Amino acid sequence: MLDCCGMHSLEELYSDVPDSLKLKRDYDIEPQMSEKEVRDFFEELALRNQPLTCFAGAGFYDHYAPSVVQSIISRSEFLTAYTPYQPEISQGTLQYIFEYQTMMSQLTGLEVSNASMYDGTTAVAEAMMMAVANARKKNRVLASATLNPIYREVVDTYAHYHGIVVDTIPETDGVTDLEAMAEMLGSGDVAGVILPTPNYYGILEDYTGVADTVHAAKALLIMTAPASALGVIRTPGEWGADIAAGEAQSLGMPLNFGGPYLGYMCCKKSLIRKLPGRIVGATTDADGQRVFVLTLQAREQHIRRDKATSNICSNQGLMALYASVYLSLMGAAGLREVNEISASGAHYLARRLEETGAFELKYPNRPFLNEFVVKFKGEVKLADFMDVCTACGCLPGVMLSENELLVCVTEMRTKAEIDRYVWRAETFSKATVPSFNNPKNIND
Amino acid sequence: MNRKYYGKVIFELSRHGRRGYSLPKNGCDGGLDGIPEQLMRSSDPVLPEVDEPTVVRHYNNMSTNNFGVDTGFYPLGSCTMKYNPKINEEISSLPAFTSLHPFQPSATVQGALEAYYMLQSKLSEIGGMAEFTLNPYAGAHGELTGLMVIRAYHESRGDMARTKVIVPDSAHGTNPASAAVAGLKVVEVKSLPDGTVDIDALRPLLDETVAAVMMTNPNTVGIFEHSIPEIAEMVHACGALMYYDGANLNPMLGVARPGDMGFDVMHINLHKTFSTPHGGGGPGSGPVGVRDGLQQFLPNPRVVKRNVSGDSTFELDFGTEKGPHALGRISAWLGNFAVELRALAYILSLGRDGLKMAGALATLNANYVKESLRDLYELPIDRVCKHEFVFDGLADKSSGVTTLNIAKRLLDHGFHAPTIYFPLLFHESLMIEPTETESKETLDDFIAVMRDIAREAVESPETVKNAPLETPVRKPDDTAAALNPIVTFTELQNTAMA
């Protein structure tokens, strides 16, 4: 092969690289490992992780992953393909994206969906930019104080560099202050409003009339919800939202220490040419067969360059397949069951925790699905309770403050696990840390 | 690949009452009962109702109309479609990684944090940088993050007038798009006929309004920018920073490092150089590295290593002490973690010698294909290339056969097409990147087919122009798709295609 190139050594292939730039030593990286050594290395590393029985949510949910899903997304024809730029040999990818778009449109109650975004946080940030691009001369966006703070941080980062001002709509008793929102919209310079459902505290807010108020101010309504919940809760489309953007990890995707997850974005059809990311459409081929293609590419970075609606390129293709297969297996009935079982477990745990006398619900009058905030009444610190639970193999929730805990239950949690959680809370509230004696049989 | 088209949509297999799931019961009930009706959906979503075997067959049949790296040769320029080792898949699915919730206490995720830290350290060594963040989800997300880092740096110095980014006209479309999202104005700089940046065109553009110059090296035509030290000096002299788009890093493994070339900020596509599967369009990963002095501008959270009485522990740093110029958060957590695990497994499998060999063999393979076809295809830049090169269509264009026709004819022969009509420097760009994981036999097969197509273009040009002829579907009507977008099954049902 070197002969064919008129060369005598591999080094000659780099004769055009100035000598001063060449690395004159080996990388400070280990010599190569055999496959067995690599496996041993990671198995040893994995031992330094402690998987916990998960009562934490806060945007990332421990739902059941049917084994079919992993089996299908591991098929190398899907796994090792590139973005479907050659439709004649990419119908598999194009078709599942089309199915995914249909399913997300059904879940959000909005007419169209793109092919995926990176995750929920960036999807909401992109929705914000879309609202500003749509409004042309306005650069102010409102976000509810009840939005997940991680989402807000990402939105703020994008906003700062994109020249957008994000103001916070205050909350009262765990829900968005809608009167304050109406007042803030009065300034006439707002391009979009971001509202969560359920919100960060797990509360299902009542947004009756909100879309009219937002639209009267010529702003777009952006709503965000975990995809799984959309199987039962009132949809962004039903609330009158223009854009739905959020996280679809709750469709049975592994927690995976933060990724890969799946951002989704849906909108009214009138906004489709402003929608970022890839979109698959149906058409016919030269033989008249129904086929699928990437469409409306004139919006995208590889054509529009700096005039594109977004810079998004590769994103979460395979995770869109994950969602399609999951939703095909579950159907509307399965998704409803997931929500029913999760909500029943959560309401049971909330009630039992209150009964221990150690906890009280922070928002007792607000409806919730499967996540809620409790306040710890004991004199010992919540942080110590977290430590005790962790030592028992349980993650009891996400601390919101030194005495508030955001707790989540999914269909993955058994009654026994929930009861052990309650037992720990009960015992802990009556004991001091050193005397907290944990018999082995209550470990998770 | 199955040449017979499958073509059904899962909704068409739906039958009322079928189900493909089984869920555990927790013995609690009534969870949805107390929720007011106006907070619930008025009707169920229309989703498929199908049993498990139907789901499995549907997606498996669909997959057979797809072409992956595991199906065949994928010489897609600038995409580095190398083989994705299977061990990496296994590592990334170890339950002690997949089951971790992001908010677990650091003490319970030491293995995961160590994996993150190890990968960022190794990428820093490979890039010649001080520290990497693995948080960006993809290449374009990395570009955006890197440009935000650069803006944060200038802002921290009160240097607010730097609002432009200079990008070569040969750059990937995401470069200008990322710059625009980061709030920067894009200025294009011309390339010389050999595809390298024209220093004389660049010089007058450099002033106090420039935030950064964004380059790939080797560039998009596969040529090493030999003037890079001079360019870096000019750019730094005007107070701007150098950004390295790592899309083309593969051939430089073990040879030269972006940090040593004078770049300040860079991203790497783990789904290119570090062999993580592309997944039909993600999930990828676009780690961003910075030279010493810029670490404080990296996004949150960072993973830091602490040595406590001889033991190393890994902690998350949310930058609370870093003052007002920290970037903030650009992703939910630590990026596409399972992708990061795959890349680390790949680096450990290859080791320092294997990585160096990968770069050299990728370069050899590209030059071999180029030299074997240059008599029949027009080679506008006749120099030793790196990992990829560009033909400007056929040498003999009299038949009217275009680059698009050649690309489609390759599909008939069981190869993926090269990248076409990019870079924009030539009318008939045909960009070929073989990667190092292809054998000489595969390359020879590809070369033989490319030569056949060139011959066919003269002898029966209509055959080539009508390609593809043997793929599961034929050329789609893109115009109709864009004119009247049908993007859901709901819409499809109301058309003649139902």
Image (spheres, rainbow, N blue to C red):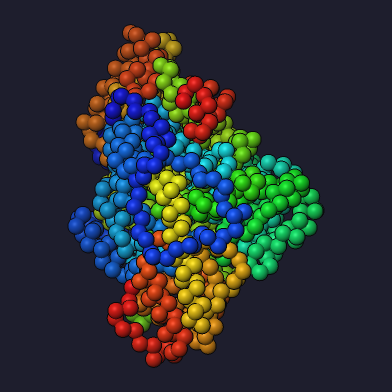
| Residue farthest to the right, as pictured | A187
Quick one: quadrant of the N terminus of chain B? top left
**Residue A333 versus residue A392 in the image, above or below:** above
Q: Is residue B220 left or right of residue B439?
A: right
Q: Nearer the viewer, residue B115 or B95?
A: B95
Q: Is residue B261 among the parts visible in the rendering?
A: no
Q: Residue at coordinates 54% horizontally, 45% vertically from top-left? A: B43
Image point 32% across, 76% down: which residue?
A443
Residue A414 is left or right of residue B443, and the answer is: right
Q: Residue A98: x, y in percent?
A: 46, 35
Q: Compared with residue A44, is residue B4 higher up or lower down, i.e. above or below?
A: above
User: In this orientation, which residue lies closer to the viewer: B328 or B68?
Assistant: B68
Q: Residue at x 36, y 42 (%)?
A: B18
Quadrant assignment, res A305: top right
Spot occupied by residue A384 in the image (x, y as percentages of width and height): 45, 82
Q: Position of residue B426 (x, y in %)?
A: 49, 25
User: Residue at the spot x=34%, y=67% of the render?
Assistant: A51
Residue A262 seen in this snapshot = yes
Q: Position of residue B122 (x, y in %)?
A: 36, 59
Q: With B141 as the anchor, is B72 left or right in this view?
A: left
- Where is residue A62, by image quadrant? bottom left
Identify whether B432 is placed above or below A18. above
Near-viewer residue (B276 or B431): B276
Q: Nearer the viewer, residue B121 or B472?
A: B472
Count all numbered tags in the image, as a single digit: 0
